Image: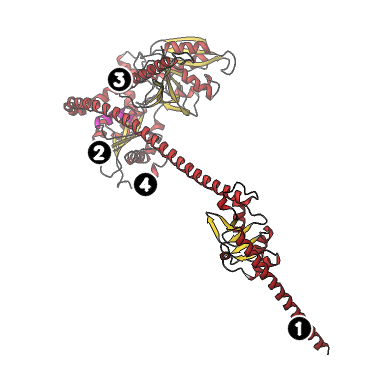
Amino acid sequence: MSDRTAALDSVIFGVDVQSGDVRGDAPSYALVVFDGEGVERDVVSYRKLRRRIESEEPSLVGTDNMYELAEDKDSLVHFLGTLPAGTRLVQVTGAEQPEPLSRVASRHGVPYGKDPMQEAEAAARLAAANVGHEVTAFTDRTEVKVSRGRSTGSGGYSEDRYTRKIHGAVKRRARAVESTLDDNALEYDRDVTEKYGGFANAVFTVEARPEDIPVTTGRSGDVRVEMERKRRDGIEFRPLAKRRDPVVVGIDPGTTTAAAVVGLDGEVLDVMSTRTADTAAVIEWVIERGRPVVVAADVAGMPETVEKIRRSFEAAGWTPDRDLPVDVKKHRTRETGYDNDHERDAIAAALGAYDDRADQFDRIAAKVPPREDLGTVLARVVTDEESVESVLADLRDDSGDDEETSEHVEQETSPEQRRIRQLETQVNQLQDYVADLESTVESRDDRIEELESELSEARREERREARERRQVTRLERETDRLEHELDEKEGRIAELEGKLERLKTLWKLDHSNFADVAEKKAGLVPVKVIEQFTRDAIRDADEQFGLAEDDIVMLRDASGAGQSTAELLADVNPRVVLRNGQLSEMADAVLFDADIPVAPADSVTVQEVDELAVARESEVEEAIDAYYDRAAERKREQRAELVDQLISEHRADRRERG
């Protein structure tokens, strides 16, 4: 029932609601304190329960329902955060879908009664037997923050010196914390806020639990050190140690060795891969996670390394009829998380063995009574191919012999004795293998110590260089961004300054009062240039510098305009239109009918500066006069043509009548 010795290293609390409810004002709890031998019972309030947990620091607090200690999820997270570093909350009835406490107690041979004190005792004994799931809301990462222990103040002639003193103290304490983390080979990331004279704060994110970090918290002088465990996204359940549980193990040997452990329900319990650990380390890792009854590989022939591990456990072996294809392994492990192909292959091997033996496991489990050791029966049936009945009879005979030697006094083998026998068996299995390795241990230890020292120094140097590279990269990106913005703004300023000067010139030319215009520009008039005789070009010119009545307009390309385009320009009613190229007949007719003068652009001297242009007033007047002379002649010709047409029509009409 238990993997622990008769006297536990620390006490275990079992808790059940005695009266009231945690959502009410004053719930009381039945509290059982179990140390492996004696039992202490008490009825306490919620506050007293919290005080006893804080003062006595039990290793486990067992309960049949975690929400008897907290009213909701947020309260539960707060409760977990206040537990001492070495204390874990255990829900002995399972994880997300707990079973009735009576059923769990019966399955593990623990006395049970409906009285709250009896339920609390059952929870304590089950937790002591490693039954249930640890309830956790925190990761194994811890944030260590070194910050100012007091305000830097304000005002005063000595404020700078005082601020520098505080920031210097924070920097020294941060370096001391960093040195402690390095000396203990703890992985961490550092984030520092530099201020005048030193650090305002330094935050270390350490890959360890608070109890594994040898840093003293609290305020000391000008510096405060705080430690906070990082939270998970939600509540997580972790099964307690399952060293006695029978499992199926998959091994993928090679330069990188991977191992996977699968329970008899087909659930992948754990997986690992390593390039440095030897076979002994892999065996130790497996022992910590269960009792292997089958050791499997994913190739048809059992590799030597896998066979050596199988013999060390005296477990059955399993290999497929032919090497498992990659697509089969991917499909079988599609719902399982793994970090590399080696872990995938180990999981696929374990699941393949489980699939092949699942029906056998179920038949054996159905025949084994709850109080019997399922792992022992499975190991003998699967490995030695004995029948379940013969194994159970053999186990009962062993129990009967013990009873006869004690004059028929009924005495069940204690959990501790069964555990001792288990450990003795495991020791015998490993002794042969250990003997082969002892000759290399001393040399490896020396080499490991040397490499660890080099690794620690290399990590410190690498972290320092990485921090410098990140800082340089960040500053270079910021410099490039600012230089790009500066270039854009300088270009925009130059563009606007040029445009402003051109607009000033145009404004001066466009006003009737020429008193402020340089004498050399007297007699000049502005000309507004339209690139093409199209509606879009006319609108663009209007948006850019405005088109108004009596403007002088020059068409850089006068061809192609139709009636609507000509009418749009006629609506502006310019003083004269200077054209480059020939107008279409339709456009020419529209402008002629609107009495807008049109003259060739080469008849006037036009000087251009960017999109601005000027022409001499005298030449413009001459061009307008010339147009009106041509227009008068054109009108006379039109009238003559009209008279000729009327006469022709009159004569034709008379001939038709005669």
Residue extent of the magenta highlight: 268-291
Residue 97 lies left or right of residue 23; in this view the side is: left
Rounded to the nearest whole Å, what is the CA distance between mark 4 and mark 2?
A: 23 Å
Q: Which of marks 1 and 2 is nearer the N terminus?
A: 2
Residue 117's spot in the image, x, y percent? 50, 13
Residue named by callout 3: 420
Rounded to the nearest whole Å, what is the CA distance between mark 1 and mark 2?
A: 113 Å
Q: Earlier in the sequence, mark 4 or mark 2?
A: 2
Secondary structure found at label 1: helix
Q: Which of marks 4 and 1 is nearer the N terminus?
A: 4
Nearer the observer, 90 or 110: 90
Question: Which residue does the image show at 64% across and 54% down from the upper left?
Answer: 547
Q: Answer yes or no: do the residues labelled 1 and 3 have beta carbons within 8 Å?
A: no
Secondary structure found at label 4: helix
Residue 455: name its quadrant: top left
Secondary structure found at label 2: loop
The three-letter code of the residue at mark 4 reads Val
Rounded to the nearest whole Å, what is the CA distance between mark 1 and mark 3?
A: 137 Å
Instruction: Please state which of the two labelled residues, at mark 1 or mark 2, is closer to the viewer.
Output: 1
Residue 655's spot in the image, x, y percent? 80, 88
Instruction: Please state which of the two labelled residues, at mark 4 or mark 1, is closer to the viewer.
Output: 1
